[in-house]
Amino acid sequence: MKNQKTALMFALAAVACWSTVATAFKLSLNYFAPAQLLLVATLSSAVLLILLLGYQGKLGLLKTLFRERPYFYLLMGALNPALYYLILFQAYDLLPAQQAQTLNYTWAISLTLLAVPFLGQSIRRQDWIAIGLGYLGALVIATKGDLLGLHFESPLGVSLALLSTLIWASYWILNTRNQGDSLASLALSFLLALPIVLAATAIGPGFSMSAWQGWAGAIYIGIFEMGIAFFFWLMAMKYAENTAKISNLIFISPFISLILLKFIVGEAIYPATLVGLVLIIAALLIQQISTSRKPSTPVKTIE
């Protein structure tokens, strides 16, 4: 049964979760390397998703989905969470969180570009405007407003943050061909990603993870960013009478996130970050104009 008030409550809960994750990423990376952080977060999220599936009586779907399309779900798990979060966490390790999270928000622009070769879609005039505004915003953020000097605090960090958007967009383009249950598909992807992340941790930083702050942050990220926020958003879409009004709530998240970064992490918020963020959000709003020809994808928040 549709209920806009219930949908609003679930959507706000999801936005609240997503608004805290940039802060959680940055604080946790003081104690764990990116691969270590991802290992604990992925395991935490997988456990939560399995519990949610068990509550819904859908555990049997895991075996069914894997039998039907094993290579597809292996690829999905390799992209998200394994490769996507490894690269994103590394970007956070190299950049101020405000830069990494806002650059990551250009994933929807990447999706528009990748939809052309992979989904056979054309780019509309307003899409070109959105692409221009979005990447101008990214350039303002990456250079701290020094557009003429083009000085980047960490060229590698900026490159990784933008690369993460391509991986996330690729994941959702593949997901448009997935007819399986959303929650079961996500749980299966996380389970299949665990061996990959385990290997990355063994080859890279190893398993010396004694700091309780790192464990607390990683578990928080796994439960709230990777797991329960997604469930809340699915429920919001399920109950929504008007999905557009609910989806627009996501634009609250980046501004709350910047406030938390300032007061909890202690980052001074650059004016260029705010200018760039406004440009990126303007680009995303332009993209929402007449979106009937766009691939249907879940909303991805700033991280």
Image (cartoon, helix red, strand yellow):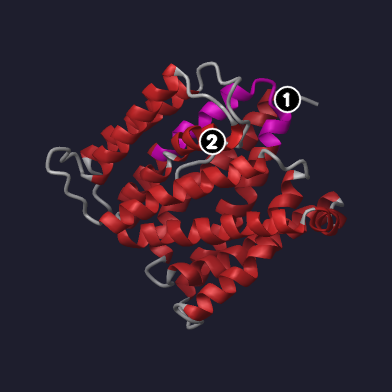
Left or right relative to 57: residue 191 = left
* Mark 2: amino acid: Pro
**Which stretch did the figure color magenta?**
235-254
Q: Residue, x 57% and y 55% (percent of image)?
A: 79
Left or right relative to 209: residue 11 = right
Q: Which residue is mark 1?
A: 3
In which quarter of the view is residue 156 placed?
bottom left
Residue 266 place in picture, x, y as percent:
28, 55
Residue 300 place in picture, x, y as percent:
53, 40
Q: Is residue 135 above or below residue 85?
A: above
Q: Is residue 107 above or below residue 287?
A: below
Q: Which residue is mark 2?
A: 117
Q: What secondary structure is found at the residue carrying circle 2?
A: helix
Q: Nearer the viewer, residue 196 or 300?
A: 196
Q: Residue, x 84% and y 59% (percent of image)?
A: 63
The N terminus is located in which quarter?
A: top right
